[in-house]
Image: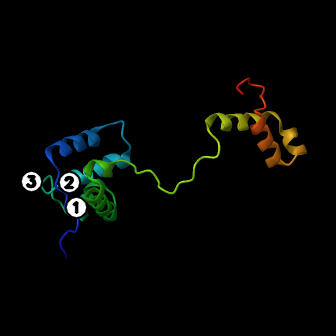
């Protein structure tokens, strides 16, 4: 089997922060699994606790070995701590409505279905949002 392409060597500070993430109850399961993966893959740690192969890490964490290799790759490309966090999607479209407009739209569709039935649905909603038509709950 070929040698590992992405070796993980954590500093003491990185290791402490990853241990904190792995123990945290405020982090997502994905983040905790990624942190545990990096801790087990660390080549600077003695053999029973670190420097393990992908298959052993995957078995211990009950995840796919592809997950382990992807975490290793991200850690070498972005850094250990940055690879744990969720990366924002680069090509994601901006939201059409903000939270207030969305709430207004929901209230409008719930309270005035006859308005939407008479006019074209899209035209009526666009007009109501543009005018800022107040709705019965008094929120807009």
Please give left or right for residue 54 compared with residue 45 in the image: right
In the rendered image, which residue does mark 2 sit on?
40
Q: CA distance from mark 2 to mark 1?
A: 9 Å
According to the image, label 3 marks what residue? 46
What residue is shown at x 57% (from left), y 53% (from top)? 93
In which image quadrant can residue 111 be found? Answer: top right
* In the foreground, 125 or 54: 125
Q: Earlier in the sequence, mark 3 or mark 2?
A: 2
Residue position for label 1: 56
**From the image, which quarter does the N terminus lie in?**
bottom left
- Residue at 78% x, 35% y is 131
The single residue placed furthest to the front in the displayed view is: 130
Which one is nearer the viewer's eye here, 12 or 33?
Answer: 12
Q: Earlier in the sequence, mark 1 or mark 3?
A: 3
Q: Secondary structure at mark 2?
A: helix
Q: Are marks 1 and 3 in contact (CB under 8 Å)?
A: no
Residue at 26% x, 51% y is 80
Q: Where residue 48 sits in the image (x, y, percent)? A: 12, 54
Residue 97, position in %: x, y?
Answer: 65, 42
Q: Position of residue 108 (x, y in %)?
A: 77, 35
């Amino acid at each position: 089997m070929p040698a590992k392409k992405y070796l993980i060597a954590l500093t003491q500070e990185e290791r402490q922060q990853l241990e904190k993430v792995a123990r945290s109850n405020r982090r997502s399961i994905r983040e905790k699994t990624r942190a545990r993966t990096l801790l087990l893959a660390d080549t600077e740690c003695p053999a029973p606790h670190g420097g393990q192969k992908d298959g052993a890490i995957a078995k211990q964490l009950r995840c796919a070995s592809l997950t382990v290799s992807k975490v290793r790759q991200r850690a070498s490309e972005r850094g250990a701590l940055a690879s744990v966090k969720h990366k924002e999607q680069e090509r994601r479209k901006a939201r059409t409505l903000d939270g207030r407009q969305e709430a207004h739209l929901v209230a409008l569709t719930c309270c005035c279905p006859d308005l939407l039935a008479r006019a074209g649905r899209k035209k009526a909603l666009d007009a109501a949002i543009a005018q800022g038509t107040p709705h019965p709950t008094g929120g807009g």
